Amino acid sequence: MKAIYILLGLVLAPYWAFAQTDKPKNWSVTGYVKNLQTVLFIEDNYLQDNLIHNRLNFRWFMSDAFTLRADLRSRFFWGDLVKANPFYGELTDQASNDWLDLSVVPLNNNNLVFHSVLDRFFLEYSKDNWEIRLGRQRVNWGISTVWNPNDIFNAFAFTDFDYEERPGSDAIRIKYYTGIASSVEFVAKGFDDFDEAVMAGMWKFNQWSYDFQILAGVVQEDFAIGAGWAGNLGNAGFKGEATYFLPRKEEGTAAFTMAIGIDYAFNNSLYLNVGYLYNESGSGNAGVGGLFNFQLSARNLYPYRHALFVQQSYPLTPILNSSLALIYSPVSVHPLFVNPVLTYSIKENWDLDLVGQIVFNEDEGYKSPVQAIFLRTKFSF
Amino acid sequence: MKRLSWALLAIWTLTAHPAFAQAQDALSIIKKADEKLRGETSNGTMKMTIVRPSWSREITMKSWSKGTDYSLILITSPARDKGAAFLKREKEIWNWQPTIDRTIKLPPSMMMQSWMGSDFTNDDLVRESSIVRDYTHKLLGTETVNGYDCHKIELTPKEDAPVVWGKVLVWIDQKEYMQMKTEFYDEDDYLVNTMLGKSVKQLDGKTLPSIMEVIPAEEDGHKTIIEYIDLAFDKPIKESFFSIQNMKRVR
């Protein structure tokens, strides 16, 4: 019962708030509620999992220059995976925080876990050419389409398509716009131990109708330097980025990651995106199990050394979109990740997604050891 | 062109063309119709409705533009897309996605894609082509459209013009120079889309159709309607307004 009241409160709170006044507001609340049903097939067994997911994005426009932003992400989990793991709540909680602990687990038992986290909580000053943010925020330095070696402030699970916002970093970010499409910025994350520190500068500029970026800094136990671009080859988009990680200590190893991609939108609305990833830290002979619990970082973006990506997306109607993504790695077990997605807009604010994640590999014959099917309903407000 | 007027605002000077003062030739009519929708700048609020036989969807947005080179569009509904913004500066287009905190540069081929599933393309919204510069014009005669006496003009795209049509027929009101009807033909001379101007109103002191409907020729029950909720011309907007920093800030 308790769970139902909490959920109702989260969904209805913005409506009560909206109902109060017609005056131009200096604040806003937006968000969504999602229901995600998962069926996971592993060899001959299957597991069923359920998730209700609420997001509330609060904005307070304090003045022309200052904005306070707080986003609350709350999730109810139940099903076979919750039952099978007595530490489900603790593990979820550990994975959701950065330097500060901004999360709670009010319900944590064998049947139901409720977890809530402020994954954005920052003050922004934006005036003239300055943009300064202090607090938990998303620092998204990616510029290319699929893999982002320059995205050094983030780590997320590759298969977690349900969290497009991604976790925040507890950081200070000072950005100065030097022009229309150019800027310099410095970002530092909070840390207790210097081996956990991430701090770096980035310079963005625009030349020959290309956006370029160059970064340098410290990423935990490495020095990192990187660069990326986004531009066009004819009518196609041409994007890429690369980062070189040089260990600060003698015992570390260097790593180089590079991603490159081309995307094109045909007249009939078919969108095609092809890409390649070189990941020096990736394995040449690992199995496929890692795909589903692999925590990636900019230093190691995929379990394998090489990966080829093809994605096509086509609107069957304006409210029904189909897409298919394939990722293949030319390594000893020939892992292939197949990701079909159907997205349907039920009504203006209601969406339905059907997502498949199917893995194939060479293991005494080419077969698929793991398949996952997700059905997601989303209501946005 | 099946266009949105705020994105139409070509900076034009009459200095080099003394002949315009005289005959009502096709080009000068087109220019007057184009100027009608033009100011140094424009900004407004509009609602787009995509209509299909079994469903319809609404999108509302705010827009700002300066000349034909600079425009900014902010999506204000539906909730899922609220806060997303599109910035166009000359040939470059960026898209701001607030949910992932990222600016994405769009490839030029995205320009000819349908805009959010509608019968408009991205190009219609961020205007690359111009009915004045990119076509040659021929006056075919006069016809009445919806009670308005109109000049009927044929537009043929110039070579190298960034235009997908084989030809365009346009009906322009003789008194107020409003674009009341436009037909778009493909290169094989088949009618692809018809655009109708409706609900003539005073918008910031100009008499203009406040509703534009695009109706695909081959699709029964399909259309896209754009309605101007408000529209203002010539408010001062600095060129620096059209920046990546501001794309994130406008609301």
Image (cartoon, coloured by chain):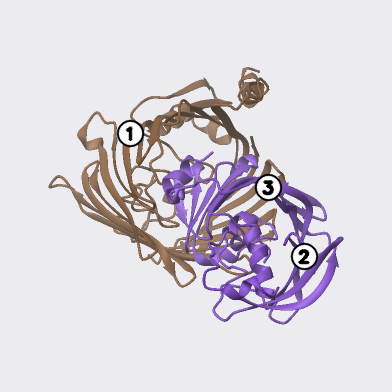
Residue lying at the far top of the rendered structure: A2
Q: Could one spot residue A54 in this view of the protein? A: no
Residue type, numbered disc 2: Gln
Percent of width and height locating residue B227: 72, 49
Residue type, numbered disc 3: Gly
Tag 1, which chain?
A: A
Residue placed under numbered mark 3 in the picture: B205
Percent of width and height locating residue B251: 54, 38
Residue placed under numbered mark 1 in the picture: A171
User: What hue does chain A carry in this figure?
Assistant: brown
Q: Quadrant of residue A349?
A: top right
SS for dot 1 = strand
Q: Which chain is depicted purple?
A: B
Is there a contact, CB below 8 Å, between mark 1 and mark 2?
no
The answer for how far apart the CA atoms under marks 1 and 3 are is 50 Å
Q: Which residue is drawn at the image coordinates 49% and 48% (left, top)?
A: B96
The answer for how far apart the CA atoms under marks 2 and 3 are is 18 Å
SS for dot 3 = loop
Tag 3, which chain?
A: B
Rendered position, A126 above or below B170: above
The answer for how far apart the CA atoms under marks 1 and 2 are is 62 Å
Residue placed under numbered mark 2 in the picture: B174
Q: Which residue is drawn at the image coordinates 41% and 34% (left, top)?
A: A95
Viewer-closest of B147 and A188: B147
Is there a contact, CB below 8 Å, between mark 2 and mark 3?
no
